[in-house]
Image (cartoon, helix red, strand yellow):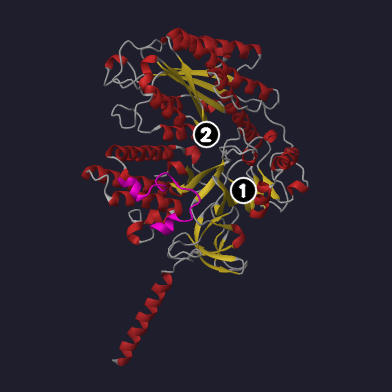
Amino acid sequence: MAKIISGSLLVLMVLFAASFSFAQSPLLQEGKNTLYQRVVTHPGAALLNGPADNASVVQKDVKPFSVFYVYARQNGWLQVGPASNQPMGWIKAEHGTDWPQAMTLVFSERSGRMPVLFFKDEKSLGDLCRAGDIETRLRKMLALVEEGRQGPELNNVLASEPADSQGAVARSRFYLMPIQAMSEPFEGTKFLQVASIDPGGSPARGGENTASGQGNKPGNNMRTAIVFVIDTTISMGPYIEQSLNVIRQTYDSIEKDKLGDNVGFAIVAYRNNTSARPGLEYATRVVSDFKTLANRAQLEGALSAVKEASASSHSFNEDSLSGVKAAVDNLSWQDYQSRVMVLITDAGPLPEDDRYAATRMGPVEMLDYARAKQIWVTVLHVRTPAGAANHAYAENTYRRLTRLSENSASYIAIPAPNPKDGAVAFAGAAKTLAESLTKVVKATASNQMAAKPTAPRPGASPQEEALHIGQSIGYAMQLNFLGEQRQNRAPSVVKAWIADMDLKQLAVGRQNACVEVAVLLTKNQLSDLQKQLKVIIDEAERVKRTDAKDFFQSIMSASLGVARDPGRFSRNPGQNLRQMGVMGEFLEGLPYKSDVMLLTEDDWYRMSVGQQNAFINRLRSRIARYEEYDKDRAGWEGFGSANPGDWVYRVPLNMLP
């Protein structure tokens, strides 16, 4: 009997030990109690059964940019696993980059900024920024980068973005720049330690400049699409006619410059919800898809038939965002590499909480939706006396819809004290905008660089603003086009330091972001986030407790969980970090924060009921954007994976809750 008991006890002890070893925890980040170490894998990584080259293979080709938890570090090897409760195998340490949170960087549009330089250490970057002759040094460095040469000025530079003459790294190219560490030596400017990983690249040798594509000749068939999205409600008659005149004049210029089918125009009209006012006839209508010079008569005929509505809308604001979405969704953009949308209106968009708004997205989400399709949005806002009370709201909203940088937007105010003067001012701005864009097409066709944008003077006229915006958008489109043609790669470096603001602008006391922040999410993780937000918001609405502590903490937990560790959030989407006592640890040390993360609980309680409802409406708008992410096949990168749930998307930080 004793032998039986002791034998049973031995079996239980073995089973307990096995279960204990199975539930292994990853290594903690230094100084943290709940945040685990993670790495993102490089292309070419292999998962082995042990920390040796001759170990058996667990997985020959690990999907690039897979995120693994780290369980052990041994002699240049990492024991890793996709889940936080069990290791799966070993990879070489050089095939994984430490990633303390889920944030990555994307190069911002190359309009008015210099190429990003990757420095070998933080000191080298700091020494340059603090130098009294920083402008002189930068000029020499940029000259070397432009010429593709090395020099003593670049001794501390590991790599750079391609020079302007080589084009940008195309927006459609998938690369990853995970943030490993951060400091903030200057107010508003961060120094970031990053890795730059490109599936088609290889690690750069120290001191080598990796502006790829150098020596290749650019293509010249840059086809540009321009759509006018026109408010056709009452009072817009003069601007419909002037739009036709602008297209006619631009076609004349295209014919003169022999640009053939390189520029196409389209027309989308919008009004407002017809269930509220049936007399409006339509909410949105594609008047004409893109037509080039060869089909000029068809477009002019279609536009000449467009008239302003004979019935009034239910509000002064019109459903302009549904017009924008209709243009994004229903036109033949795929035939054009460069894409511009010009919204023409004398009223603001319907607010997100207007029950008659056709789209559930707000201006920030709609901008992200258009930019994901590489469409640039400009607004020509006709400011009439009748809309005086609406001007401030409309301008604020349209600036968010057309944001170019922290301090600029592709928004042009058209003074219209009367229909005649307003039509003249509109025609001048619209014609200047169209001409500046077609000049870029002509320059590209001639293998020439377009003119760099110049800042408009204070108090600039609408035409001057239009010229600046046309040059800025055109220059960025040309660089993106050249980058696509040359298949430019992001620099590939294992570890380097960059500034998040343009160094050239920083030298003269201005700030212009050269990188944008995103979070890498799988389809499954984005789906979990969307479902969780719906539950949180619907519950808050159901019980009318938008000021309840659990609502604020639940939203904050969702945002922090995704930014820090989407894998853990995805497995436990309902966890409340405050209740777990780890809210502060998840928040501290994040290099960037979304608008939710910037809120404090006191801020939330100080909001009025109206402000809290507006906040919830913005979250609903984010959910609507997540649904569109799911449909955006071009934005998802699967790296050959047959399971769509494992595909990844770089979700902009400002689209997190």
Which image quarter holds the N terminus? bottom left
Point out which mark residue 95 bears: none
Instruction: Name the foreground residue: 565 vs 552.
Output: 552
Residue toward you, 647 or 466: 466
Q: Which quadrant would residue 234 be assigned to in this image?
A: top left
Residue 201, given in percent of the width and then of the height, sits at 65, 48
Q: Position of residue 653 (x, y in %)?
A: 46, 44
Instruction: Give the residues in magenta.
Output: 583-605
Is residue 561 left or right of 376 when viewed as pictured? left
Q: Secondary structure at mark 2?
A: loop
Q: Amino acid at mark 1?
A: Ile
Q: Residues within 10 Å of mark 2 (few under 14, many from 20)?
A: few
Left or right of 507 on screen, residue 59? left
Label 2–label 1 contact, CB within 8 A: no
2 or 1: tag closer to the N-terminus: 2
Q: Position of residue 110 (x, y in %)?
A: 61, 35
* Residue annotated with mark 2: 407
Instruction: Report the amino acid beneath label 2.
Output: Asn
Question: Real-space Cα distance between discs 2 and 1?
Answer: 22 Å
Reply above or below: 289 against 560. above
Residue at image position (50%, 33%) is 371
Q: Residues within 10 Å of mark 1 (few under 14, many from 20)?
A: many
Eye-nearest disc, 2 or 1: 2
The residue carrying mark 1 is: 498
Q: Is residue 596 magenta?
A: yes
Is residue 408 rendered to the left or right of residue 210?
Answer: left
Does residue 286 appear in this view?
A: no
Q: Looking at the figure, which quarter contains the C terminus?
A: top left
Q: What is the x, y in percent for residue 380?
A: 47, 20
**632 over 288 or under it: above or below:** below
Check the image and name the residue furthest to the bottom: 2
Q: Is residue 218 left or right of residue 612?
A: right
